[in-house]
Image (cartoon, rainbow, N blue to C red):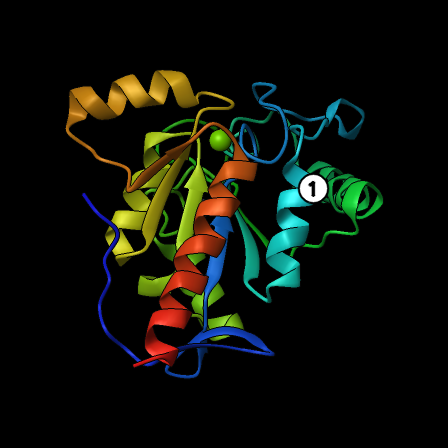
Amino acid sequence: MGVVREKVHSTVSESGPEVNGRRVAAFLDRDGTINEEKNFLSDPGELSLIPGAATAIRRLNDSSIATCVISNQSGVARGFLNEDDLVAIHDTLKQQLKKDAGAHLDRIYYCPHHPTAGIAPYNISCECRKPGIGMLERGARELDIRLDRSFVVGDRIVDVQVAMAVGATSILVLTGYGTTTLEECKAEHVSPDFVAPSLSEAVEFILQSVYDDGESTTHE
Ligand SMILES: [Mg+2]
Ligand SMILES: [Zn+2]
């Protein structure tokens, strides 16, 4: 599957890339994409950033591309941690990104649910658990984002699937579970639009896509 190059009024202005006045976003998975995969991380002290991740997010910030974390956290439903623990982990994440590269995230969305496992009130079928599109829709609403011109970066097949579900560009990273996921994608006939060794190269691809596009429409 290639990257869709639909001709719309896409511009790159001082306020960043826009499509028909709406923003472009990078929706980023958390575990295995921004920070090292730790199998139900519950202690903020265990959070460690993947090399280059903070700088990559800073580059998105500098290009005024909205940055939203979209993270399945069924550890909450399973009783491994609670939402206060998640808040503490996300505070640490924000601090580390800032300290490492002056980077920030515009939103951090997470799904605490699981459809079958776990405890009330979290053991429900929901719209937010990836590959459900609830977190993307919320980002689109809150930040005025055009999803079909945006990007989803992650290390699991659900990250690729949630991108496909809204017509966004899917980028599979080979950090976290990415190498295993690449095999799974082949077996399931799911094709990410781009495969990147890590978030750094994924962001390089995003910036190239956005800016190539902006230039081509500017000169028309
Ligand atoms: Mg992940
Ligand atoms: Zn959910």
Few, some or many residues within 10 Å of mark 1 (<14, 14–19, 20+): many
Q: Is residue 196 left or right of residue 4?
A: right
Residue on which disc 1 sits:
54
Q: Please determine whether, in this image, residue 108 is positioned above or below residue 22.
A: above
Residue 179 image point, x, y percent: 39, 18
Identify the image quadrant of the C terminus: bottom left
Residue 48 image point, x, y percent: 72, 26
Residue 119 in view, yes or no: yes
Residue 25 image point, x, y percent: 48, 61
Q: Is 96 or 83 nearer to us in this picture?
A: 96
Count the marks. 1
Residue under the image location 69 percent in, 43 percent down: 55
Q: Is residue 85 left or right of residue 160?
A: right
Name the amino acid, label 1: Ala
Residue under the image location 59 percent in, 78 percent down: 15
Residue 121 in view, yes or no: no
Identify the image quadrant of the N terminus: top left
Residue under the image location 60 percent in, 67 percent down: 64
Q: Please determine whether, in this image, residue 25 is positioned above or below residue 122.
A: below
Q: Is 136 or 119 nearer to us in this picture?
A: 136
Residue 106 image point, x, y percent: 63, 61
Residue under the image location 68 percent in, 52 percent down: 58
- Residue 185, quarter of picture: top left
Q: Is residue 27 left or right of residue 49?
A: left
Q: Please determine whether, in this image, residue 146 is positioned above or below residue 157.
A: below
Q: Please determine whether, in this image, residue 37 is positioned above or below residue 31.
A: above
Q: Is 79 or 148 nearer to us in this picture?
A: 148
**CB at disc 1 and ligand 1 closer than 8 Å:** no
Q: At numbered mark 1, what does the secondary structure look like: helix, strand or loop?
A: helix
**In the image, farthest residue toward the right:** 99
